């Protein structure tokens, strides 16, 4: 038995490069009959099966190669990719570590290990691996781009643009880096830098790439030229064959929705919003996101938080009176981001924006499946102190006060659902509940897009959004009935009508003196380095009442859900004319 001729090996690699995977798999299988110890044949068969989606056979082939050559780093890395594609994250991580151990200078397994950690939501570990991959290969644009994205997700915004620019320096035509940089600059309100980035993208990608008219349309909208923005965004379309393209097309449709709304084209806005929400539904389905899960969280709490259960809580006789955290809550699109930005104008206030501190606290107390809600009553002082410490440790990752005496505000709209657990751990917590006309709130949720979570999955139709609104506020009313919450309400319509008149009582509630910086909302917004929420492009505008009563223009679309919302319209004082009196 002789070895394979070099010319034959070259022809096999040519089949792979040409994408002829079926032919490659057939030829390698035939050759393996006579050459069962040829590592290259096993790895090429594995590569062909990997591309054909036959992951089990790819895994068997790479294992066979490693049985012959255990230290073959590239085979370990390819085996890890096969495990990753079929969801076996633990096996994938082991294979990528084996690849890195056998070839410490090999950057790709470090990058792939970062992908595993990102899938496991171990973002700090993912960032470390992307850093190591980029250090091993300074020209690794993919790793630099992934590093920028993960730093962005971690809230470490300072190095994000620099990482994207490093990626583009080594690969000027790398589309994900152009896309990521421009999105980051836009959400950071760095408009002049964004213009330069858009010009660079046009030079590198060509004017015909859909990203170019898309970005130029957003710049036109930022300049207030909405007709031009609409024309530019309607002139392009992104392919939706994969998740990345679906995200881009959804973003285009969402911006068109907002532009049509500004141009009083309600039918156009609803047409684009409907298509954007269809894509949101597909993206959520791909991720296995189920709106029923969040509804279940709400209903579980409504069942548990009854007078009889709360009376059985073990009293925390040693509770510290000094622990009085502040929470801005409400419903998405109710104005929490606007209030957040106004409060930031006060020199003694620092705001944590959509942090994971409360979700972490809730998971600690009741578990992801709410299995331990009933154990809230048995918590000891030690349990509560430990939960408090973890909450503050998490919160510190999102806000770094410039002074020890700063007042920290935790702002996350749907922490409304977890007010019960918050109160159990922090009986003296203060809540600022943002309210907005229920129809405006639900409509705005439908006209915007959100990240794919079980809570946000209810915003894909007006009916589901209204149902969630009803469920959330039924729970909030239950909390106010059975718990002694220290809470005040702030109506969005009143806030935009008279900022000082509304914010003075809020500051008194927080025990802080008035400061005129509260009124300079636009400057505060533009000085924010980054705005995480769906409102990022609105809070930088001057305070206006344009969005108050917007639902009336969309009445024909909202009529089916108004019966669900009418009890809340009445309860919150919007029944007379849609706008509460100042």
Image (spheres, rainbow, N blue to C red):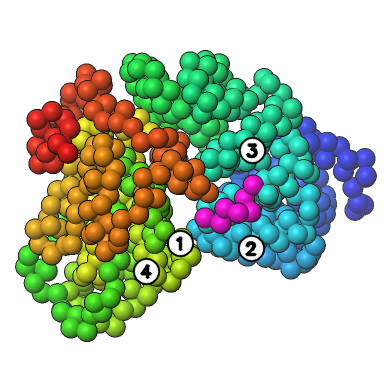
Question: Looking at the image, do the residues carrying marks 1 and 3 touch, with CB atoms under 8 Å apart?
Answer: no
Q: Nearer the viewer, mark 1 or mark 4?
A: 1
Residue tagged 4: 391
Residue 223 falls left or right of residue 436: right
Q: Quadrant of residue 49?
A: top right
- The answer to whether one can see residue 258 in this image is yes
Q: Secondary structure at mark 3?
A: helix
Q: Residues within 10 Å of mark 3 (few under 14, many from 20)?
A: some
Instruction: Judge by depth and name the residue closer to the eye, 564 or 185.
Output: 185
Residue tagged 1: 399
Q: Secondary structure at mark 2?
A: helix
**Sequence-wise, which precedes: disc 2 or disc 3?**
2
Q: Nearer the viewer, mark 2 or mark 3?
A: 3
Picture layout, residue 18 above or below residue 511: above
Residue 156 inside the magenta-drawn segment: yes
Distance from disc 1 to disc 4, alpha carbons, whole Å, reads 13 Å
Q: Nearer the viewer, mark 1 or mark 2?
A: 1
Please provide the residue range marked out in magenta: 155-161
- The answer to whether one can see residue 214 in this image is no
Q: Secondary structure at mark 1?
A: loop
Residue tagged 3: 193
Distance from disc 2 to disc 3, alpha carbons, whole Å, reads 28 Å
Residue tagged 2: 128
Picture layout, residue 291 above or below residue 403: above
Question: Looking at the image, do the residues carrying marks 3 and 4 touch, with CB atoms under 8 Å apart?
Answer: no
Distance from disc 3 to disc 4, alpha carbons, whole Å, reads 37 Å
**Sequence-wise, which precedes: disc 1 or disc 4?**
4
**Sequence-wise, which precedes: disc 3 or disc 4?**
3
């Amino acid at each position: 038995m002789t070895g394979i001729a070099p010319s034959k090996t070259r022809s096999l690699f040519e089949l792979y490069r040409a994408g002829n995977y079926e032919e490659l798999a057939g030829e390698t299988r035939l050759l393996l009959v006579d050459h069962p110890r040829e590592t290259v044949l096993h790895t090429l068969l594995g590569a062909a099966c990997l591309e054909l989606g036959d992951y089990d056979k790819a895994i068997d082939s790479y294992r066979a190669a490693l049985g012959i050559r255990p230290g073959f780093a590239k085979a370990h890395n390819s085996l890890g990719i096969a495990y990753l594609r079929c969801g076996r994250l633990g096996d994938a991580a082991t294979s990528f570590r084996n690849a890195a151990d056998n070839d410490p200078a090999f950057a790709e397994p470090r990058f792939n290990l970062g992908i595993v950690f990102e899938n496991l939501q171990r973002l700090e570990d993912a960032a470390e691996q992307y850093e190591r991959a980029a250090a091993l290969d300074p020209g690794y644009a993919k790793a630099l781009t992934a590093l920028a994205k993960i730093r962005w997700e971690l809230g470490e915004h300072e190095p994000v643009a620099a990482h994207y620019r490093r990626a583009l320096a080594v690969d000027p035509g790398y589309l994900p880096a152009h896309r990521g940089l421009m999105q980051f600059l836009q959400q950071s309100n760095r408009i002049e830098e964004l213009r330069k980035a858009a010009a660079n993208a046009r030079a590198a990608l060509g004017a015909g790439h859909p990203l170019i008219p898309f970005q130029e349309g957003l710049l036109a909208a930022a300049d207030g030229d909405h007709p031009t923005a609409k024309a530019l965004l309607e002139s392009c379309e992104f392919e939706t064959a994969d998740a990345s393209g679906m995200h881009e097309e959804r973003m285009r449709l969402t911006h068109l929705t907002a532009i049509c709304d500004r141009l009083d084209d309600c039918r156009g806005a609803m047409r684009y919003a409907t298509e954007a929400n269809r894509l949101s539904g597909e993206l959520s389905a791909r991720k296995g996101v189920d709106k029923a899960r969040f509804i279940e969280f709400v209903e579980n709490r409504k069942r548990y938080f009854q007078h009889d259960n709360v009376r059985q809580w073990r009293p925390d006789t040693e509770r510290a009176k000094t622990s009085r955290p502040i929470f801005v809550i409400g419903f998405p699109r109710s104005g929490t981001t606007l209030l957040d930005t106004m409060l930031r104008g006060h020199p003694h206030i620092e705001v944590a924006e959509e942090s994971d501190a409360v979700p972490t606290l809730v998971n600690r107390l009741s578990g992801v499946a709410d299995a331990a809600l009933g154990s809230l009553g048995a918590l000891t002082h030690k349990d509560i102190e430990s939960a408090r410490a973890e909450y503050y440790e998490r919160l510190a990752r999102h806000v770094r006060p410039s002074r020890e005496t700063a007042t920290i505000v935790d702002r996350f709209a749907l922490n409304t659902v977890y007010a019960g657990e918050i109160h159990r751990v922090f009986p003296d917590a203060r809540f600022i509940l943002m309210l907005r006309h229920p129809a405006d709130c639900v409509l705005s949720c439908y006209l915007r897009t959100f990240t794919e979570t079980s809570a946000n999955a209810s915003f894909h139709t007006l009916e589901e959004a209204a149902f969630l609104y009803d469920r959330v506020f039924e729970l909030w009313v239950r909390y106010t009935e059975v718990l002694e919450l220290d809470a005040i309400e702030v109506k969005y319509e009143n806030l935009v009508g008279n900022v000082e008149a509304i914010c003075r009582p809020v500051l008194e509630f927080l025990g802080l003196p008035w400061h005129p910086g509260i009124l300079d909302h636009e400057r505060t917004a533009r000085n924010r380095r980054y705005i995480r929420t769906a409102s990022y492009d609105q809070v930088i505008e001057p305070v206006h009442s344009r969005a108050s009563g917007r639902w009336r223009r969309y009445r024909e679309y909202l009529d089916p859900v108004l019966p669900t919302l009418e009890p809340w319209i009445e309860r919150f004082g919007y029944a007379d004319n849609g706008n509460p009196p100042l």
